[in-house]
Image (cartoon, rainbow, N blue to C red):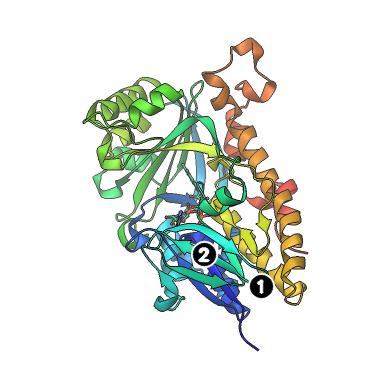
Amino acid sequence: MEKKHAVIIGGSLGGLFTANLLRSIDWEVDVYERVADDLASRGAGIGTHDEMFKTLRRIGISIDETLGVKVSNRIFYDSNGKVIATAVLDRYMSSWARFYRPLKDLLPTSNYHFNKQFTHYTQSSNKITAHFNDHSAVDADLLIGADGIWSAVRNQMYPDTKPLYAGYVAWRGMVNEADIPKNLANEIFTKHTFCLPEGQYMITYPVPGANDDVRPGFRRCNFVWYHPLGLEKLSDICTDDQGKCHGISIPHHLIRADILSEMKATARSIFAPQIADIVDLVKQPFFQSIYDCIPPTITGDKIALVGDAAFLGRPHTGMGTTKAALDAEYLIDALLTSKGNLTEALTDYNQDRSRFGMRVVERGRWLGAHLSAHLTKPKDQRSPEELEHRTPEVSMREFGAHLSDIPELSAIARKH
Ligand SMILES: Cc1cc2nc3c(=O)[nH]c(=O)nc-3n(C[C@H](O)[C@H](O)[C@H](O)COP(=O)(O)OP(=O)(O)OC[C@H]3O[C@@H](n4cnc5c(N)ncnc54)[C@H](O)[C@@H]3O)c2cc1C
C-alpha cells in the first residue's frame, strides 16, 4: 500500500516532533521551513518537563545528564538583594538547540527543506496542496501547521483569529558563566532566582553554553524579565536608529542603544543588585512580545495545527515545547487508534487537544494577570488574580511547575 504523505510547515521543535513520530508509524514526511539556513544558532534557554523527555525517548533519542543543567534551588530576592524565601524543585534547564539538533538529525536531509515559505493551501476531495512563495507546490494527504505564533496555516483557516498581545514583553539575554565575577557566580549561578517588584517578573537560571556544553565553567546564565509595555512604547522599542519601525519585533542587533541603556537602568532601579549585575553583563539583550491565542478549532479537512500554531499559551508555564511534543504524540496516537481513518483521528485530536490547549492558555493568563493589569487598570478595579497577591512561596511553586503538579493539565496530557 502506498504510504500516506504529510507536509509539515515549520521546521522548529513542533514540526520536528511531528515529523519523527509520523515516520515512526510509516508515513512519508516532508518539512518546509522558511528560514534559509540551520536554525541551531537560535539561542534561547528553555525550562523542560519530564513529559517531553518521554516523547523524545519514544522517538529514539536518549536522555541523559547532558540534556541540560539540573537546578534544584529556587531563591526569591527582594529589591535590595536580600533573600526572602527559598524552595526546592528539581528541573532541567536547557536550550532550544539541544533538542532541535537530535530531532533534525533523525530526519533524512532530503525531507527537510530550508528556505521554503508556505503561502497558502488549496484542497480537492482527495488531497491538500501546500503552496510556497517560490511558486512551487506539493501535494499531501495531511497538512500540519507547525508554523508557530503567526501561523500562516491557522491564518488561512481563521483569518479573524489573531494572537492577543498580553500587555508586556519579555526581555531576555544570556551571559557566559566564565564572564560572571566569582562572588556573583557563587551566589546565584546554579540557582533559579526570582525577583518580583510590583508589576514586574524577573527570573534567572543556568542553561547549557555554546554547543550545549553543560560542564561547570562553560555554561550560561539566562535571564527573562516580563515587563509591562503599552503599544506606543512597544512600537518605539521596535524602531531602529534610522527611524524604521519593524512592527511588533525587531532583529536583536537593531535594538537602539538608548533603549538598551534605559532597560538596564530600569533593571538597576527595581531589581536586586545581583540580578541587575547579570543584566548589565549581557552583551546583546533582546525582547519578545508576549501573546496568547485561542483558535476556534485546531483541525480542518486534512489539516492539523500543533505547538504554538495551535493554542498558544503565555510562557509562564515554561511548557511551550512540551505542549508541542504532546500535541504531536496525541496526533500520532489518534491516527493509530483510528486505524488510518483521518477524519476520525482529526476529530479526536481536535476535541482532546483543544481542551488541553485551552487550559494551558488559561493557566498562562492566570500567572500573568498582574502583569497585564499593571498599566491598564487602577488597583481598585483589579480582580484578585490581577492583584499581586501571591506570596514568594506560591510564585516559586507555580512558575514552571512540573506537569505532574498541575492536576488539571496532567490528567489530560496524553491520550488514554
Ligand atoms: C519569553 C519566552 C520564554 C519561553 N520559555 C520557554 C520554556 O522555558 N520552556 C518551553 O518549553 N517553552 C518556552 N517558550 C515557548 C517555546 O519557545 C515555544 O512554545 C516553542 O518554540 C513552540 O515551538 P513551535 O515549533 O510550535 O513553534 P516555533 O518554535 O515558533 O516554530 C515555528 C517555525 O515555523 C517557521 N515558519 C513560520 N511561518 C512559516 C511559513 N509561512 N513557512 C514556513 N515556515 C514557517 C518558523 O521560522 C519557525 O521555525 C518560551 C517562549 C517565550 C516567548
Mark number displayed over residue 126: 1
Quadrant position of residue 116: bottom left
Say whether residue 145 is visible: no
The one nearer the camera, 398 or 334, is 334
Extreme residue toward the bottom, this view: 1
Report the quarter where the C terminus lies. bottom right
Give the secondary structure at mark 1: loop
Q: Residue at x 59, y 78 (%)?
A: 27
Relative to 272, say whether 253 is above or below. below
Query: Residue 280: x percent and y percent?
Result: 28, 33
Residue nearest the viewer, comparing 205 with 297: 297
Circle 2: element type: strand
Residue 132 in percent (x, y) is at 44, 61
Q: Is residue 121 left or right of residue 332?
A: left
The amino acid pointed to by label 1 is: Asn
Indicate the position of residue 297 as horizontal and vertical percent values: 69, 50
Q: Quadrant of residue 245?
A: top left
Residue 45 seen in the current view: yes
The answer to whether 190 is drawn above or below residue 5 in the figure is: above
Residue position for label 2: 130
Identify which residue is drawn at 62% across, 78% down.
4
Between the C-alphas of marks 1 and 2, the distance is: 14 Å
Residue at the spot x=53%, y=69% of the render? 7
Mark 1 Cβ inside 8 Å of ligand 1: no
Q: Residue at x 36, y 45 (%)?
A: 221
Cβ–Cβ under 8 Å for marks 1 and 2: no
Task: Compare residues 345 and 377 and report the one nearer the observer.
Answer: 345
